[in-house]
Image (cartoon, rainbow, N blue to C red):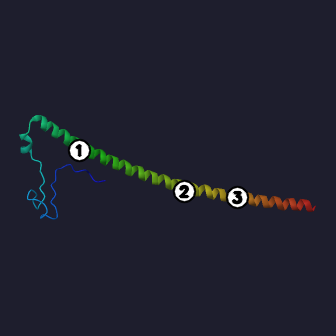
Amino acid sequence: MKKPNFDINKKSFPNDDLVGDEYSKSPSVEEFSIDKLKQFPNDMIELFKLIQAVRYNRTCLQEEYNSYRLKLNNDRMDLECEVIKLKKQYNAKICALQEEYNSVKSNNNIELAKIREN
């Protein structure tokens, strides 16, 4: 999943003739600098720090969520593989028991036929 980008980006438009002179041909991006930050009052600086902390926390939580999701998917696939193996084992046991039952049944039928003949 793509991480969100909250930075201010001014996009240039493909047809600059249709757009007024207020937009330049190259996009301008506001960059972070400590000098700019020191110009603002302390309340604004605290707010900026809180916003940065929230962004960092959100990206960390998103990465943690993605890792847990990946682990969950891997565990689910492992469990599905185990279920398939167990089904194969039980099907083999069932087939063996059916063959044994059919063998015993036919032996009983043969013995009953011999007893009836006598």
Mark 2 Cα within 10 Å, few/some/many (few <14, many 20+)? few
Mark closer to the observer (1, 2): 1
In the image, which disc is placed on residue 56? 1
Query: Where, by quadrant of the figure, is residue 19 drawn?
Result: bottom left
Q: Nearer the viewer, residue 90 or 47?
A: 47
Q: Position of residue 3 (x, y in %)?
A: 26, 51
Amino acid, disc 3: Gln
Query: Where, by quadrant of the figure, is residue 16 drawn?
Result: bottom left
Which tag, 3 or 1, sits closer to the chain's start?
1
**Which residue is tagged 3?**
98
**Distance from label 3 to label 1 (Cα)?**
62 Å
Q: Residue at x 78, y 58 (%)?
A: 105
**Distance from label 1 to label 2 (Cα)?**
43 Å
Amino acid, disc 2: Lys
Q: How many marks?
A: 3
Amino acid, disc 1: Tyr
Which tag, 3 or 2, sits closer to the chain's start?
2
Q: Position of residue 27 (x, y in %)?
A: 13, 58
Q: Position of residue 100 (x, y in %)?
A: 72, 58
Q: Position of residue 101 (x, y in %)?
A: 74, 57
Q: Residue at x 12, y 48 (%)?
A: 32
Going by the image, does 114 lie left or right of 20? right
Q: Residue at x 8, y 39 (%)?
A: 40
Judge whether 37 appears above or below 79 on screen: above
**Which residue is tagged 2?**
85
